[in-house]
Image (cartoon, grey):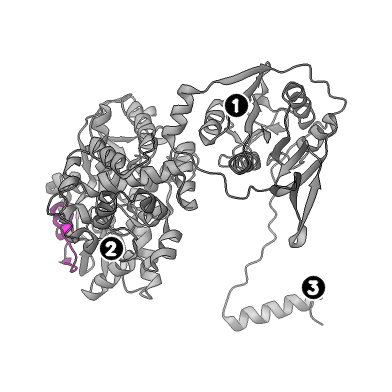
Amino acid sequence: MNIVVLIKFVPDLVEDLEIDASTSLLDRSFLRLIPNELDEHALEEAILLKERLGGTVTAITVDFGDVDETLFTAVAKGTDRVVKITGEDFSQGVSNEKLAAIFQGVLADLPCDLILTGTQAVDDLDGFVGALLAERLGLPYVGYVTKIDVQDGKLVARKEYPGGLNADIEISGPAVLGIQAAEKPPRYVVTSKVMEAMKKASIDEQEAGEASVEAELPVQRMSLPETGARAEMIEGSAADVAAALLKLFRERGVLA
Amino acid sequence: MSVATSYEFLDKVISATPDGEKIRKCLQCGTCGGICPYGFAMDFSPRALIAALRADDWHGVLESDTIWLCASCFACAHVCPTKIPLTRGLLATLKTEMLIGGSIPQELQTALGNSRRYGNALGESPKKRADWTRDFTIPVPTLANHKDPVDVLWFVGDYGSYHPRVQQVSRALAKLLYVLDVKFGILGAEECSDGDTQAFTGEWGLFELLARKNTKAMGRYQFKEIVTADPHAFNALKHEYPRLGFNRTVKHHTQYLLEHADRLAPLLQNRGPQRVTYHDPCYLGRANDNNIYDEPRRLLRAIPGLELVEMPHNREMSVCCGGGGGGMWLDGFVWEKAHVRTAEWRIKEAIGVGAQVLAVACPYEAPRFEDAVKATGNEGKLAVKDVAELLAEAAFG
């Protein structure tokens, strides 16, 4: 099975996020960008499938900045081919609509059986990229996938629903799947293998074609959550606290 | 890169380790497995591992994951009558093979991934490495903002920089350096993990990556010597960084403070706790024959009213806190496999000799031993303090 994995880079939440006062958007000047966690799960699932069923894995990302190390790490993990889409400064962020259009352009020359990506990314939680891309390619899409298998020659994706429900969905491939979690956590690959990949592998750089987008959802304003002084600490002995709680419950109508 | 047979593996150990050829002379006496704190839970003690390799059971060796119980405490290497470099050679090289083969407990993967991405095992922002110096009364200069040469480059380390408990040790040491009028500075955001513990998980490539970042950063500044409160950083800077061409004097804080004992002792006016015992960190003592046993004890004895008592396991026979060799990042795995914690044995020994305070000298120890005090039901009976903290309390109250 030949699998393509799409990787988007998102702000690293280890750093403090700041809003640029002049634009009311995320201040991206000192942001550290890292691969979206669920896209790393998508890559892991692809490599697990390759190990089980054979085939190839191709990882594609756009040039968000320091993406080479991520791509070489992907090679060290078992990815056969890595593609970096260049041509524009994408470090300031790309809308999901445009990202889907860019990926469509590259996929036109890259026939494959399965396209995997994270079901959503932490930067917007929209979960649009996979679905929009499937629509553009005229392929089926299933999101929130936690397992992929082939049964009797057919692709079966396990989709996770809220409330602990799972569904096994049979799909006629090729298809786009949004990965919620790989079957195993993304693997750590030893540094010497990454270094070896840096020496031996090469990144296939492709210029982004004309990515026409009919509509986008521009973010108008971002803000940090406002914290209100709503918590009231009740102090004193156990009896005092219990009495204060009872009084509160009666006031708020919890108890008669 | 990865090896396919036992004999290839033995060749790798021998070529990659100073004195590695001694492995061929193993007498199979079993002293190593006897002294290993987790020997009872390992499928292959060092002795059994050598036997399996001689029998060419490479597959059997790779099938077991109990090598991850090894806390690289150097107990086995220390007692080996043939002086085989078991810890750094045999065991760390087997860990490398496990890493290459992908047999890595998940919690260790997280710490190694954090180390590679952020330069610290805790997964904290590298930009915030010097945040512990903020809102602190004592000035702790960062070398990037401080153009003049300094006497001491203080290598703070991951835990001293980020771990809330160990930050207290860093603050105590800062007070002592300040009151001794030492011209010192830290690397701040330019520092990253010393890489020693990552190396002893077998991740030598990551060690080199981290070490090169540190040597590059240190190369930008003028200083006379390096001081660190972290025995792992001390060990790496002293024995491993020179292989990368970085050869600078490094001292553990207990060595450095003892050198200034004539000026430090008159400042120690407050009476200390009455009964104190001292835990020898593996990487100050046994590892690479660092043999720093007397310096911390002499500092402790300089505190008025302090009586130093010894635990049954002391000096080169000290029992590891469990944090080395990746143990710091394998607590869940170790518990699952062994159902004991060496740190708890240590607490029982300290309580057994009637100590009020367990003095330590390694950043892994205060958090591990404080947890073990609680886990053994001894909360309030035994305090855990770094030597620097006890000295700072004696000097400043």
* Rendering quarter of residue B6: top left
- The disc labelled 3 sits on which kind of residue? Arg
At horizontal 29% and vertical 53% (from top left) the residue drawn is B52
Q: Which residue is mark 3?
A: A252
| Tag in front: 1 or 2 | 1
Residue A67 is at least partly visible in this image: yes
Please state the horizontal and vertical placement of residue B280, each as a whole percent of the image. Answer: 22, 57
- The disc labelled 2 sits on which kind of residue? Pro
- The disc labelled 1 sits on which kind of residue? Arg
Per the image, label 2 sits on a secondary structure element best described as: loop
| Circle 3 Cα neighbour tier, 10 Å, few/some/many (<14 / 14–19 / ≥20) | few
Chain under numbered label 2? B
Which label sits on residue A107? none
Chain under numbered label 1? A
At horizontal 34% and vertical 64% (from top left) the residue drawn is B41
**Magenta segment boundaries in residue numbering:** B293-316
